[in-house]
Amino acid sequence: MRPDITARIPRIQILWILIISLLLGIHVQAQNPWVVRTDGVGPVHVGMSLAQLNTAVHDHFSMPKDKGDQGCFYVNPRNHPQVAFMIEDGHLVRVDVTKRGIQTADGIQVGDSEARAKQIYGSKLEVAPSQYSGDEGGHYLTLRSSDGRYGFRFETEKGKITTLYSGTYAAIQYVEGCE
C-alpha cells in the first residue's frame, strides 16, 4: 500500500507551494499581452456598457459632457495606450489598435506586412483600396467572423499594417472613426 503523498509533505510546505504557484500565475498573467479577437480584446467584449468596460479594465470612463458627442465617442485605457474603445449608443462596438504590442490570436499586429496578413488569413481576407491612400497603395484588409456579426479590419500603407480594428461588422467599416 502506497502512503498518501500529503502525509509525507508537511502542511507548511504545501502552503508555500500553493503561494508560489499563485504568485507565478499572477506574474505570467501580468506579462501576457491582450489578444485581439473579432469580438473584443483581453477581458473586453463588444456589447459591454461603459460601466462593464470600466470593471473589465479597472478604469473610470464616463460619458462626454457635450450631449452632441454622446452618440459615439472613444475612450482610452490608461494601461493599454495602443488601444482605443469606440462607444456607440452607450456600448462598446469597436476596438482600435494603433501601435505594436497587441496582436490577433494569429499573431498579426500593427507594423506587420500586408503580405503576412494575406498569408495568415488567405482567401477569407477581403482586400479593397484604402479611401485615402492615393498613390501609396494602401488597402483595407477585412475579415468577417463566421457568424457575420464581427470582424477585423487592417489598414495598410506602403505594404505595412498601420491600424487594426475589431468589433461589429458595421463599426469596422467606419472610415473615420465615429464620423
Image (cartoon, grey):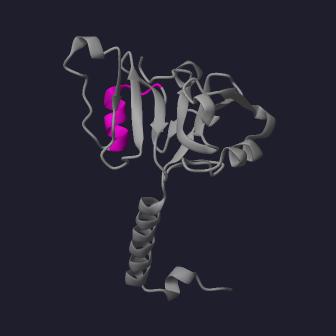
Q: Is residue 157 magenta?
A: no
Which residue does the image show at 58% across and 43% down from the upper left? Answer: 161
Quarter assignment of residue 130: top right
Which residue does the image show at 28% across and 41% down from the upper left? Answer: 59
Q: Which residues are magenta?
A: 47-57
Which residue does the image show at 46% across and 23% down from the upper left? Answer: 176
In the image, residue 77 sits, relative to residue 11, either above or below, namely above
Residue 138 visible? The answer is: no
Q: Which of these two is toward me, 5 or 124?
A: 124
- In percent of width and height, residue 44 lies at 45, 38
Residue 165 visible? The answer is: yes
Quarter assignment of residue 140: top right
Outermost residue to the left: 65
Outermost residue to the front: 135
Q: Which of these two is toward me, 68 or 47?
A: 68
In the image, residue 27 sits, relative to residue 123, either above or below, namely below
- In percent of width and height, residue 78 lies at 30, 46
82 relative position to 147: left or right = left
Please tell me whether the stretch drawn in magenta is mainly helix, strand or loop.
Answer: helix
107 relative position to 100: left or right = right
Outermost residue to the bottom: 8
In the image, residue 30 sits, relative to residue 46, either above or below, namely below
